[in-house]
């Protein structure tokens, strides 16, 4: 099995449910062709480098997977005929150095997905709690 990365951009005008459905269609094609999906990286809505089909923004998704060579033709056929996909790109990793880089990408995206984002918690503090007493234990020589 070969290692592949497919990036595709969906229209920004789709609802979140429609966007998820478009992503799922592509994942279903990979699975139907006996491919193994390793990681899906939803990058969210981003500005395009240039206007495509009158869109200045798009929803980016990257899929890392392993599959046989014939899978790419079927995936790209589905991406071409889907009018909600405005751009796509597939990359095949072949030599050892590229495959090592592919494995690093998969690991880094996997870690990013596993790590919960820390959200700051608003805490109400009383004035007595915010006062901190610190004693200076240094000698006058150390302060100078």
Image: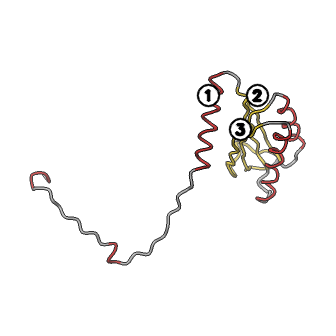
Q: Position of residue 36 (x, y in %)?
A: 76, 38
* CA neighbours of label 3 inside 10 A, class few (<14), some (14 to 19), many (20+): many
- Between tags 3 and 2, which lies in front? 2
* CA neighbours of label 1 inside 10 A, class few (<14), some (14 to 19), many (20+): few
> Would you name the residue on which mark 1 appears?
100
Q: Residue furthest top?
A: 95
Q: Which mark is residue 75?
A: none
Drawn side of residue 41 relative to residue 142, left or right: right
Q: Position of residue 113 (x, y in %)?
A: 62, 49
> Would you name the residue on which mark 3 appears?
64
> Would you name the residue on which mark 2 appears?
1
Q: Earlier in the sequence, mark 1 or mark 2?
A: 2
Labels 1 & 3 near each other (Cβ < 8 A):
no
Spatial separation of the CA atoms under disc 1 and disc 2: 15 Å
Residue shown at 82% from the left, 46% from the top: 85
* CA neighbours of label 2 inside 10 A, class few (<14), some (14 to 19), many (20+): few
């Amino acid at each position: 099995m070969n290692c592949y990365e497919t990036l595709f951009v969906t229209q920004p005008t789709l609802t979140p449910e429609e966007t998820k459905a478009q992503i799922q269609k592509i994942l279903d094609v990979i699975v139907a062709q006996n491919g193994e999906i390793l990681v899906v990286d939803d990058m969210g809505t981003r500005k395009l480098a240039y206007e495509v089909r009158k869109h200045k923004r798009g929803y980016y998704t990257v899929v890392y997977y392993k599959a046989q060579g014939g899978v790419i033709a079927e995936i790209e056929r589905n991406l071409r005929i889907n009018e909600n996909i405005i751009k796509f790109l597939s990359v095949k990793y072949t030599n050892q150095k590229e495959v090592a880089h592919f494995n690093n990408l998969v690991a880094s995206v996997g870690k990013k997905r596993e790590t919960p984002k820390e959200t700051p918690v608003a805490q109400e503090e009383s004035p007595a709690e915010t006062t901190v007493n610190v004693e200076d234990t240094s000698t006058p020589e150390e302060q100078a």
